[in-house]
Amino acid sequence: MSTPTRSPARPRPRPQQARRAPRPPVRRRRPRWAMRAVTTVSVVVLAAAGIGHSVVASLDAGIARVDPFKDMKNRPRAGHGMNVLLVGTDGRDRITEAERRKYRLGGAPCHCTDTIMIVHISENLERASVVSLPRDSYADTPPHVDQTTGRPHAGHPIKLNAAYAEGGPQLTVRTVESMTHVKIDHYLEVDFTSFMKTVDVLGGVRICTAVPMKDSYTGLDLPAGTHTLMGGQALQYVRSRHVDGASDLGRMQRQQRFLAALVDRATSSGVLLNPIRFRDVTRAVLGSVRADKGFGTDELLDLGRAMRNFSPSSSEFTTVPIGQMGYAVKGIGSTLKWDPVRSERLFQALRDDRPLATHRPPPRNAAARVAVAPQQIRVQVENGTATAGLGRRVDAALTATGFATTRRPANAAERTATRTVVVYDPRWDRSAKSLAVALPGSELRAVRGQGPVLKVIAGSDFRQVRRVRADDPRQGEFGAVRGDEVGCA
């Protein structure tokens, strides 16, 4: 069934849905990713439980409205299903001083989007596909007016998260549509405060970690095991970027894990089926949530009736494929450049309403098991010998094995290395150990201040790069994983 030009197509009614077909239009403006997700899940579950139209209408009235689609022209063609741009801002105006100190929330907010996701709801309303867009993604903005200075801007390079500061929700939507060619049907936005309050009202969210997680920047300090995180600690978990060398990419995976656990908590605990508890959750959320004007009572009710059986196994998560790490742009700094071919295939799958996750067993091979996936480990290769071309050979071998090398090997200051060395910052020791497994016989050398990019100084002992893989359920063309595959066992 083709999709209407104004919004996502209405799904065909299923036999058990006697009355009208669900109608999924949703927009939003300024709430944060997990917060907005909780609001949507809350209202959907409430509607599915048969609670009255008037209750849902009163909640709708409490949502702040914005118009991120005003005067937008030449937009992508609508596909099948519904696409929601879910953003989280770093707003911390209502954080108390005690909370600022405890959860390391000092400093001025950047007035930019801290988290950016496209949430695709399938036309049959049986699947939600979540695609994370790294905030440091290289982007070219469309022409626009700077909302701070009032000056017109021609299109120019920018980090994706800075589009919000220059042009608010509208420029954010326009930039995402320009980059993905996916039509955004609705916009939702949340901030730090509503995120923390909602997690608290839900009674916390259960998270599992096989290894200790510590980040001195956010104050996160979790021993290995299972934990129920309350609001402040949950915020530390989803904000941490210095747990290992994966930096923002690792942070996005943790956000996806948290969102899957949040959906599980909201749909399985019965909290949202209790009108009193539901009222408490929505009051915690709606104070700082913003949504587009088309996300109304009827849409919430229709979506809720159609999603009675929605669960973490109905969701899937992935991140847009990155082609080049550390892509330097004058005046902007280091950015992440998307892989043009793989990212286009991913967004075409969204437009075609196709599942992203595959469910075939991983292939049997001789790859060594490591704690951190090679795709999450950033590496700079240096030739530590007088052998011409060795740096290029090591860089190519690491790249072929999945490591995120800079693809710009250099010569080391000293050219007499007989043993290959992995130089790393102690904060990224798990990544360093994983890289060392891929370089049999290599030496680990801790250097404080090295940062998230590990350095390999190739020695004359180098022979080959050993294949490695992490215990990660992500597989298939898009590296997507279902929500039930990343939760606690």
Image (tube, rainbow, N blue to C red):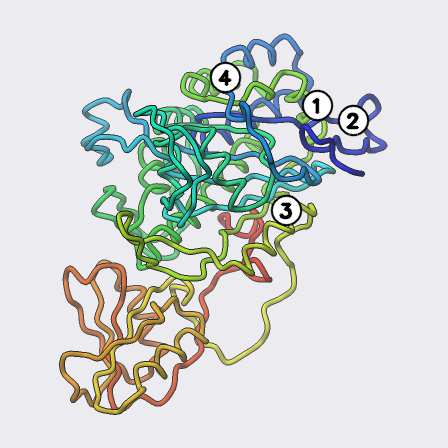
Hey, which quadrant is residue 413 in on the image? bottom left
N-term mark: 1 or 3: 1
Are the residues at dot 4 and dot 1 in contact (C-beta closer than 8 Å)? no
Residue position marked by numbered label 4 in the rendering: 65
Residue depicted at 66% across the width and 39% down the height? 77
Q: Is residue 203 visible?
A: no
Residue position marked by numbered label 2 in the rendering: 21
Is 471 on the left or on the right of 448, as rendered?
right
Residue position marked by numbered label 3 in the rendering: 350
N-term mark: 1 or 2: 2
Residue position marked by numbered label 1 in the rendering: 302
Nearer the camera: disc 4 or disc 1: 4
N-term mark: 4 or 2: 2
Nearer the camera: disc 3 or disc 2: 3
Q: Position of residue 484 (x, y in %)?
A: 57, 48
Query: From the viewer's perspective, is residue 160 above or below residue 169?
Result: below
Q: Position of residue 90 (x, y in %)?
A: 33, 32
Type of residue at label 2?
Ala
Are the residues at dot 4 and dot 2 in contact (C-beta closer than 8 Å)? no
Are the residues at dot 1 and dot 2 in contact (C-beta closer than 8 Å)? yes
Type of residue at label 1?
Asp
N-term mark: 4 or 3: 4
Residue at mark 4 to residue at mark 2: CA–CA distance: 26 Å
**SS assignment at label 4:** strand
Is 454 on the left or on the right of 61, as rendered?
left
**SS assignment at label 3:** helix
Q: Nearer the viewer, residue 8 or 170?
A: 170
N-term mark: 3 or 2: 2
